[in-house]
Image (spheres, grey):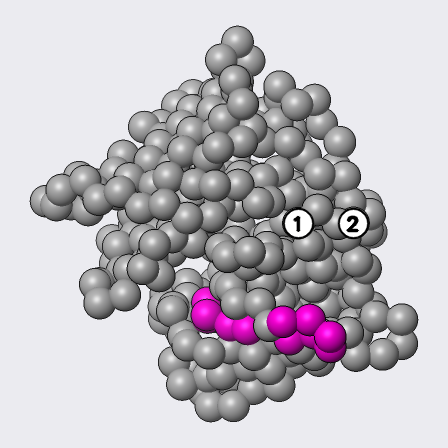
Amino acid sequence: MRPEGRLQVLKGLAVATALVLPSVAAAGAVLEPKLSPSDNYGENFTFIGDLDGGTFIFVQLTVTNIGPGSRTGLCRTTVLTPGQRAWSAQTKVKARDWRYDAESSTLKMGPCSARSADGATRVEVPLDGGRVLLEYAAPMTPQGQEGTEVEVGKDRYHHEVTLAFSALKATVKRPKGEDVVYTGGGYADHTRSTIAPAKLAKRWVRFRALLGGEKLVLLAREGQDGEYGPAYAWEEGAKARSLEHFTLAREGLKERSSWTVELFADGASAMVLRSTSLMQRSAPVEDLGAVLGGLVRSVVGSPVTYLHRAVLEREGKAPVTGLMEVTLEGDL
């Protein structure tokens, strides 16, 4: 990998472990980064679509001080469609090449942009000869949940859901391909952290049921100190339910891994997540190799994320299918 390519990867690693839940922000400024001088500062605006035929789309706009330079901007996307090769693209821009425009409520990150206004949200990512356009049928609105802030000394991590259960239209043009239009369910969140990624979490579990009659999002974190939180499950139309802790059982290794997650509340088992099929394994530090990976591991850690189709089981309720992510600090 060329040096400039490695720097792009390293910037992406700075935010690879961050995910998301709620806070209070002015609705019109929900896409405005809250900059920090901290060397460990990273802020992510993440957009996800679960669409027709099993297509999954991920878009993330990031501002970070981690790595060379400050206030560096990143735009990246991944499109996974059954039966097709995964398509991923990203670009890195300097501080002068991104901005938030208050008048139009738009965050511009090089060629990429996200706008939330007039009752809708629009995200456009034209990269590497391809293009992703996400059109949510709702504006981004921070959802005020409790227990969504992590403190490590004087540093903090904060998570907020900004779009939980929105209808979504997605237009995808792969390089040298034609526009393909999908419909489905969408999700978005916002995270901001001044905690070094390697110190933020030991494990994350995330689940999003965005299609079908029952919609739900779930987030659970285990810290490096063994403490849990944020941890909650939130059904559409209901108040979020706090969770106490979780256990994580694994069968197989790497691409052959499958997972069972048991989540607890009020001193008892509350729900169980079971993976059904692997969509992607992402290990950016591991992919750098022993020498370069060793140089960055002390700061960003070595996050490995498994994206699965999964089912959530709860006593007295029908199973719910959706997307599950398991992120580990290091992998066996």
Residue 86 coordinates in the image, percent (x, y): 27, 60
| Residue 228 visible in the picture | yes
Distance CA(mark 1)–CA(mark 2)? 8 Å
What residue lies at 22% left-to-right and 63% top-to-bottom? 85
| Residue 95 visible in the picture | no
Does the magenta-highlighted stretch encompass residue 311?
A: yes
Residue at the extreme left: 176
Report helix, strand or loop for mark 2.
loop
* Viewer-closest of 259 and 180: 180
Q: Amino acid at mark 1?
A: Glu
Total labels drawn? 2
Residue 204 coordinates in the image, percent (x, y): 63, 65
* Dot 1 crowding, Cα within 10 Å, few <14, some 14–19, many 20+: some
Report helix, strand or loop for mark 1.
loop
What residue lies at 77% left-to-right and 74% top-to-bottom? 270
Q: Amino acid at mark 2?
A: Lys
Residue 190 coordinates in the image, percent (x, y): 60, 40
Relative to 197, residue 99 above or below:
above
* Viewer-closest of 219 and 181: 181
The residue singled out by tag 1 in the image is 236
The residue singled out by tag 2 in the image is 239
Rendering quarter of residue 203: bottom right
Query: In this picture, which residue range is highlighted in magenta?
Result: 307-318
Residue at the extreme bottom: 252
Relative to 293, residue 136 above or below:
above
* Viewer-closest of 274 and 250: 274
